[in-house]
Image (spheres, rainbow, N blue to C red):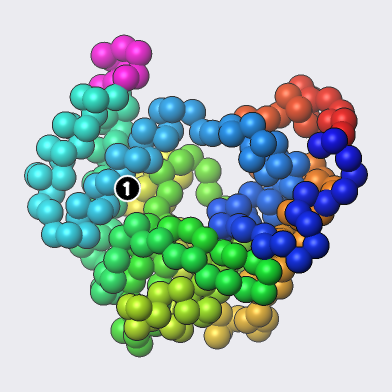
Amino acid sequence: MSDAGPVTGEGETVRLSPSQAESFTACGLRWLLEAATGARAPDVARNLGTVIHAAAVLAGVGAEDDEIGERIDEAWRQLDFGSAWYSEKRREEAHRMVRRFLDWHRANPRKLAGTEEPFRIQLGRVQITGRVDRLEADEHGRGVIVDLKTGTGKPADGELDRHPQLGVYQLAVLLGAFERFGLIEPGGAELVQVGKAALTASARVQRQRELAADPEPDWPRALVEAVAEGMAGPVFNATVNPGCRTCPVASCCPVHDRGGQVAP
């Protein structure tokens, strides 16, 4: 940064997504550096995630398991993993993830309203935008957001009631982001772990309770306002957290062993 002034001018719209709310809450400096440098997850992780999400979309429109498996193999042939052995190893891993997802999907009692649904909603000067993996309706007609996770890490169960990304998803439902589906009351949100974080042959579901059952139901709104204020401010703090070990900008972090002071 060239000066100590705020990144966003007073009164200007601050744009954030649920995932950005989570990353900024974990470490403001990492969020800033990733936004500035375009740092992304490794290609292998992104390719796996893309394939699994595509399989989820196919399942949502009624594709049979065999067809989904064939489509995965077809897509896999277009990806470059550097060697045939490594490509095959990752392909087998992708099929295991899809199997976990499909087993969970078939047993899920909720009604699927949409997959990969985009949304945009305004909260004061904050514009919340994003895309949900799955939008579902529970037996009470409430909106439930499901986020598929294909990685190796997962939050502790005790952190779920204040999980930023899930909380902002529920807030979006409450603010009318999915009114077009008739879903205006949040009924909770879930992380469905289909990667190694599942730890078993089955998907691991990590659920955040519905906001109406929370003793502080307005916490996601307060979180969004605090994150937006921080994003627009002049200071971005580095915070030690479990994500430090895989941080792509660790070499620029003053609290990391490989990092150094970040000068304005």
* Highlighted range, magenta: 80-88
Residue placed at 76% from the left, 22% from the top? 258
Q: Where is residue 88 in the image (x, y as percent from the top left)?
A: 25, 22
Residue placed at 43% from the left, 33% from the top? 45
Residue placed at 37% from the left, 48% from the top? 194
- Residue 151 vs residue 237, the one in the foreground: 237
User: Does dot 1 land on a helix, a strand or a loop?
Assistant: helix
Q: Does residue 225 appear in this view?
A: yes
Q: Quadrant of residue 16?
A: bottom right
In the image, residue 222 sits, relative to residue 147, either above or below, namely below
Q: Quadrant of residue 245?
A: top right
Q: Where is residue 112 in the image (x, y as percent from the top left)?
A: 27, 69
Q: Which amino acid does label 1 sit on?
A: His
Q: In which quarter of the image is the C terminus?
A: top right
Residue placed at 26% from the left, 74% from the top? 111
Q: In which quarter of the image is the N terminus?
A: top right
Q: Does the magenta stretch include residue 85?
A: yes
In the image, residue 215 sits, relative to residue 242, either above or below, namely below
Residue that carries the numbered disc 1 in the rendered image: 53
